[in-house]
Amino acid sequence: MSDATADPRFRRKPPKRPLRLSWADERIRGIFWQIIVVGIVGTIVWWLWSNTAHNLEVRRIATGFGFLHREAGLPIAESLISYEPTDTYLRALTVGVLNTLKVAVIGIVLATIIGTAIGIARLSRNFLVAKIAGFYVEVIRDLPLLLQLLFWYTIMQSLPGPRQAMQPVDGVFLSNRGFKVPALVWENAHTAAALAFVAGIVLTWLYARAARAKRMIDGQPRKVWPAAVALVLGLPILTWQVMGAPWEIDWPALRGFNFRGGLTVSPEFFALLVGLVTYTAAFIAEVVRAGILSVSLGQWEAAQALGLRSGSVLRLIVMPQALRVIIPPMTSNYLNLTKNSSLAVAIGYQDIVSIANTTLNQTGQAIEGIAIIMLVYLTISLSISLFMNWYNARIALVER
């Protein structure tokens, strides 16, 4: 029956019943039980808080976050910002947060690349490639992550010392002290060029979006790559040239019993990163494989009937559709990688968990230390979830 001929009485909302203060009204019963539940939860929270405060007062344990401004006296082997043991606990914890973020960001990028490649390889028509990828996934997923971290750390510790360091290429040394690679002496010109590179990416995206909108209006294609080259490559190079074009390489060299100069990748960071990446990539591979298989076979056949190659079909037709299936479980894997980085304490990498544990042992303020750890991981996890949910909503099919 159409809307024009339908009886308008059936399209009206039913009238709301007045709220009666009677136990026979299910709404009153619902409100009553909700008040009871909230009261019980509030009572339990109040009891826990008062009991904890009383015990801390009896044992004369200070509370609050005033300790953050005291001198830490805590040595930290590696940090992204300058740090000395004479700095405060707040700066030490900041170093721990940055170390955690460094592992999480690099690990997510590498795990995504490797996991995607392995997931595609599992669907390869080449028997050997598909079986090797399948063997990798089955073995890595069945081994505990902590065991894998200890395995990689043991390998790093079994390498020769600095004097007998392995040198695969000139300027690169591999020893039980970690990797030593040449490093660029960073100056203000490099920072400006990096900012120009980010600005070029944003401007290229805006230009591509505008070009796509104009094409929808007049049907005329517009080339984006000339503007992309000029903005993404030309703008940073021009900025670097204007600021003097500094280019100085710091080469590592053996001095005494250790190396001096260059960039150091510590054994702890390397073992943690490799363990997290290889472990998470195995799960991502299965997510990618399931997403590709979710696209109907008719999509492949139609694309091949048009003469497209397999690589083009996968890149242009299958993967954009598979992303709608891949993104939700991929978010869970990103969150797991971030939270699993807390196992760094087992191999001596000083992330937020390690530094916070040392802090609470020195200050005796365990509640505040645990709260800081929980707040850091909660913030990182919520940030990842918000970004992935935004991206998932962006690529979702919109019904008209």
Image: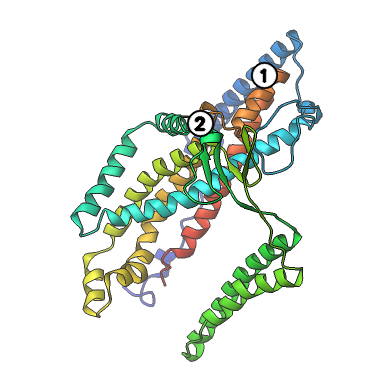
Quadrant position of residue 77: top right
> Is residue 268 something that shows in the picture?
no
The image quadrant where one finds the N terminus is bottom left
Mark 2 falls on what kind of element? helix
User: What residue is pinned by disc 2?
Assistant: 343
The image quadrant where one finds the C terminus is bottom left
Mark 1 falls on what kind of element? helix
> Is residue 127 something that shows in the picture?
yes
Q: CA distance from mark 1 to mark 2?
A: 18 Å
Quadrant position of residue 104: top right
- Side (left or right) of 297 relative to 184: left
Q: Is residue 187 above or below residue 316?
A: above
Tell me if label 1 and label 2 are in contact, CB under 8 Å: no
Q: Nearer the viewer, residue 333 or 39?
A: 333
Q: Residue at 21% across / 52% down in the picture? A: 128
User: What residue is pinned by disc 1?
Assistant: 361
Q: Is residue 59 above or below residue 224?
A: above
Which is more N-terminal, label 2 or label 1? 2
Q: Where is residue 376 shown, x and y percent of the image?
A: 62, 38
Q: Residue at 78% across / 31% down in the picture? A: 88
Q: Where is residue 98 shown, x and y percent of the image?
A: 64, 42
Q: Amino acid at mark 2?
A: Leu
Q: Residue at 43% across / 52% down in the picture? A: 112
Identify the disc placed on residue 286: none
Circle 1 crowding by C-alpha within 10 Å: few under 14, some 14–19, many from 20: few
Q: Amino acid at mark 1?
A: Asn
Circle 2 crowding by C-alpha within 10 Å: few under 14, some 14–19, many from 20: some
- Side (left or right) of 346 relative to 141: right
- Number of numbered tags placed on the structure image: 2
Q: Is residue 105 above or below residue 360?
A: below
